[in-house]
Image (cartoon, grey):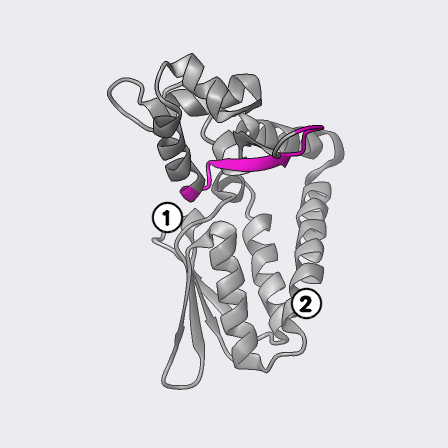
Amino acid sequence: MVILMTGNGSSTRDEILTMLKLNKRMTVTEMANQLQITEMAVRRHLNTLEKDRYVETVLVRQAMGRPLNIYQLSEAGEELFPRNYKKFVLDFIADIEELCGKEMVETLFERRKNRMKEALQKKLNDKPFEERVEELARIQKENGYMAEIEKNEDGSFQLSEHNCPIALVANKYKAACHQELELFKEVLGTDNIERFACLSDGDAACQYRIKK
């Protein structure tokens, strides 16, 4: 059994998550029977797991009777289980570099930047500069960068990102950091952006000074 959230032994919630991982989809009755606890107790744990966004409900209609609530792991729930995709990505990029050269790796990061730019422009293009900066910070926060924005007395902005979701890649391939800077310049419509701190350099955050 995979121990997911507790340090000392397995909790009932861990067992529910593991059952859903093994069985893909289950009803409350099936979980209660397997755990040998009441359905009310199972629902209580499921409510917490749904609130934490580890579990989601699928409504299945039946030929007769009421629709049935089926529970399954959410994307966040799946992420609780061990995965090795980060090392896979690093190995994959290293193979591309060996086979096709460093320029191809840089091209890959540029293509990623262009995809992100296209998505961001749909949300930012019609906004004034200050609103674009604030919206960019909000989107980066939603994407896991723990972003914060501050307005300086001179009218410039300081964007701080305290987390990097692709840190393992960025630590090895600086092209990722370079393309993020280029992305910000392009979607905000200004070349006057300076990155003066970077997580991949050992700083506490990636920090940008942004001027119109």
Which residues make up the magenta segment? 51-64
In the image, residue 194 sits, relative to residue 90, either above or below, namely below
In the image, residue 137 sits, relative to residue 116, either above or below, namely below
Q: Quadrant of the N terminus?
A: top left
Q: Splitting the image into 4 quarters, where does residue 80 fall?
A: top left
Alpha-carbon distance for marks 2 and 1?
31 Å
Q: Is residue 9 left or right of residue 125?
A: left
Counting from the top left corner in percent of width and height, residue 81 is at: 47, 25
| Residue 4 shows in this picture | no
**Helix, strand or loop for disc 1:** loop
Amino acid type at mark 1 = Gly
Q: Quadrant of the C terminus?
A: bottom right
- Give 62 or 194, whichever is nearer the viewer: 62
Residue at 74%, 29% (x, y): give it: 99
Q: Which mark is residue 188?
A: none
Residue at 40%, 25% (x, y): give it: 39
Residue to which mark 1 is pinned: 202
Q: What is the residue that sits farthest to the left in this orientation? A: 8
Q: Splitting the image into 4 quarters, where does residue 48 fall?
A: top left
Residue at 54%, 28% (x, y): give it: 87
Residue at 69%, 67% (x, y): give it: 122
Q: Which mark is residue 121?
A: 2
